[in-house]
Amino acid sequence: MSDLDGISVIFDLDGTLVDSEPNYYEAGRQTLAGQGVTDFTWADHERYVGISTQETIALWKERYGLDASAEELLADKNRRYLELARASTPVYPEMRAFVELLAGDGVPMAVASGSSRSAVDTILAGTGLDARLRVVVSAEEVAHGKPAPDVFLEAARRLGVAPGRCVVVEDAVPGVVAAGAAGMRCVAVPYVVAQAEDSAFAAAGLVFRGGQGEFTARQAYDWLAGSPA
């Protein structure tokens, strides 16, 4: 019997399982350039790490005074992103190893993402992660994106487990906040390492303050095996 019996793990996708943020930045830069905003930087992009694409678009419209509809901007950004994602989306090696460790123990797993369902499915299929991660929830499928708990609660429902038996793996403050609001424990691997000291990360049960460069599958696994439910 595994020490992880009764535990389910819910992964964020972007910046957690895969390094897709450079593609999201480039898709966003191109989309905004098409609307006449030509000075969008990586630092600007970091403001939106961890929130849904729909909410990002809404904030863009407010910040940049864009005339195009949210639907038009969303379709443009998603189209550009999918083109980039199909060409290259690397999986973090230690995260893939973690997924394999959990799969070997029969731990139920899901993905809960702020990205569109088409983007999530494309990434999972292209990286082969879909072989292990078959339960997927997109922010498009729930009422509210992170930091609301909706995607995580829906993932737990689809897994058929109580939220309190779930552990979330996240890279961004909104996701850590959402995990707490869902009543779930959290392993935090900050994508923006400079944000690791944000007080929100203190709510996570395990924090790799050095981000992906510090994360190891074995340490995360051992913490899960020893952490109280």
Image (cartoon, rainbow, N blue to C red):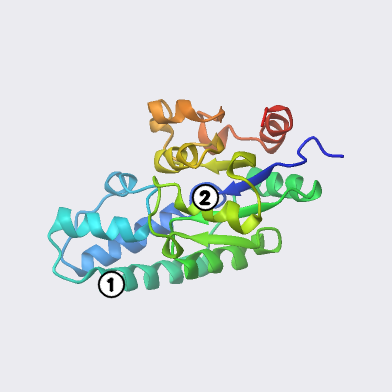
Of the residues tagged 2 and 1, which is closer to the observer? 2
Horizontal relation, residue 216 to residue 2: left or right: left
Amino acid tagged 2: Phe
Q: Is residue 132 visible from the viewing direction of this image?
A: yes
Q: Quadrant of residue 143?
A: bottom left
Which residue is at the front of the view, 105 or 46?
105
In the picture shown, does residue 34 fall above or below 180?
below
Reading the image, the residue beneath label 2 is 152
Question: What percent of the width, then of the height, locates residue 188?
Answer: 52, 35
- Label 2 crowd (10 A; few <14 / some 14-19 / many >=20): many
Q: Residue at x 55, y 52 (%)?
A: 18
Q: Residue at x 15, y 64 (%)?
A: 66
Q: How many marks?
A: 2
Q: Is residue 19 visible from the viewing direction of this image?
A: no
Question: What percent of the width, then of the height, locates residue 104?
Answer: 80, 49
Question: What percent of the width, then of the height, locates residue 4?
Answer: 76, 38
Per the image, label 1 sits on a secondary structure element best described as helix
Per the image, label 2 sits on a secondary structure element best described as helix
- Label 1 crowd (10 A; few <14 / some 14-19 / many >=20): few
Q: Residue at x 38, y 69 (%)?
A: 78
Looking at the rendering, in which quadrant would you find the N terminus? Answer: top right
Amino acid tagged 1: Glu
- Work out whether mark 2 precedes mark 1 in sequence or the reverse, and give the earlier one: 1
Circle 2/circle 1 CB separation < 8 Å? no
Reading the image, the residue beneath label 1 is 71
